[in-house]
Image (cartoon, grey):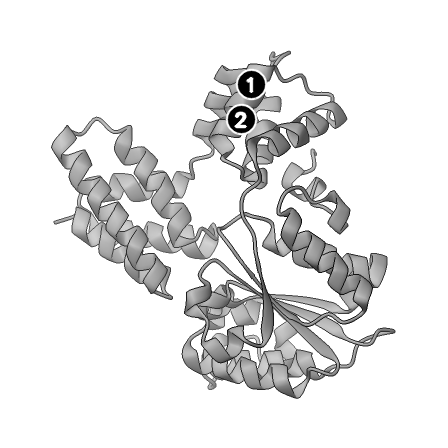
Amino acid sequence: MKDIWTVKYRPDSLDEIIGNEESFDMIRKLVHSNNLPHLVFHGPENTGKTSAGMALAHEIYGEDYQRNFTYFNASDFFEQGKGYLVREKRFIRILGTDDPKKIRKSVINIFKEVINEYASMGPIDSDYKIIFIDSAETLNSDSQHALRRIMEKYTANCRFILSTTQPSKLIAPLRSRGLELFFTHVSADKLAAFIRKVADAENVSVSEDGIDALTYHSKGNVAKALHTLQIASLKPGIENIGPQEIYDSALKDKSENIIKLFEATLAKDILEARKFIDKNILEDGFSGREILLQLHKMVVSSNENDENIAKWIIKIADTDYYLTESANDRIQIEALVAGFCR
């Protein structure tokens, strides 16, 4: 079975990461100064924030970095709730049960307890440990204030890295506790060079036109480029990957559940559409903005008349704006679908 390239080529060190040079130069200086503060990573989705956190931990702790590095995704707590908590074996000891019906505490209180428990544990053979909290924008005000107090309480032996696509969602006292670093997608030339390197390592032939098509399709998103290239490389009978193979593979990038969501929306079946909203968010792990981007592509390429397409695009644009102001993607996508189904 072939390795997934997005995992296989995830960087192990800061030097292996491409793009975002200013942020990584600052991270290197902090590591070498032995004075790492709390950090706030912010920027669009899939810009390498999580990879940066893991590479940073690898740089500090070496091969066994996971002994002192803990990853949490806040959206798992607050969007999947108690069902997620009992599936995560590391929380069973804290919860005292693997039955969600027996959990009497609120998800917010469980989140506080989990973070406090992990922050209070001493580091192993190091001055401090690192707790990485992804999708920090999904934390409500109460959770953020509690997190701020935990950061202050355990600052001697624990550093927090908060990762978010919406820094404005973080309360000012929480943002002020960390050094903010911005991440963005990589430039086309750096992505093209990385693609050539991966293609050589995998013994895959890609034409220059194919690389141009892949960089255009990926728009600086390294994970998307790797995923599309791997799909294209698996197509039988192809000796040289060109623009057509990239185009065909890009079409396969569309989630089956998002296609079904779009079909249910066209059929004005709101109950069916809500089912696939859950599948996309809870099972496939898509964010609201990722769902929007794919819905936008489907609307533009649909056979609907221009007037309907224009109306739908306006609604999608409005929802994109609302997502920047909201902490709950599901509610906004449901509102969009309900608007389509009228």
What distance separates the C-alpha of mark 2 from that of mark 1? Answer: 6 Å
| Residue drawn where x is 27% and y is 56% of the image | 334
**Rendering coords of residue 45 (x, y %):** 50, 50
User: Label 1 belongs to which residue?
Assistant: 210
Q: Which residue is mark 2?
A: 214
From the image, which quarter does the N terminus lie in? top right
**Relative height, residue 156 to residue 247 (above, below):** below
- Residue at horizontal 21%, vertical 47%? 315
Number of callouts in the render? 2
Front residue of 78/128: it is: 128
Structural crowding at the residue carrying mark 2, measured as other residues with C-alpha within 10 Å and reported as few (<14), some (14–19) or many (≥20) = many
Instruction: Specify whether 218 is left or right of 23.
Output: left
Residue 340 marker: none
Residue 96 in sight: no
Please tell me whether mark 1 sits on a helix, a strand or a loop.
Answer: helix
Q: Nearer the viewer, residue 189 or 75?
A: 189
Q: Find residue 137 and report its image quarter.
A: bottom left
Identify which residue is drawn at 19% across, 35% down: 309
Please tell me whether mark 2 sits on a helix, a strand or a loop. helix
Picture quadrant of residue 2: top right
| Rendered view: 237 above or below 166 | above
Q: Is residue 57 above or below residue 92?
A: above
Q: Position of residue 335 (x, y in %)?
A: 23, 57
Give how far across and how far down residue 217 sits, in percent.
47, 30
Depth check, front residue: 265 or 311: 311
Q: Are marks 2 and 1 in contact (CB under 8 Å)?
A: yes
145 on left or right of 280: right
- Give the amino acid type for the residue marked by disc 2 in the picture: Leu
In-image side of 226 versus 102 (left or right)? right
Q: Which amino acid type corresponds to the residue marked 1 in the rendered image?
A: Gly
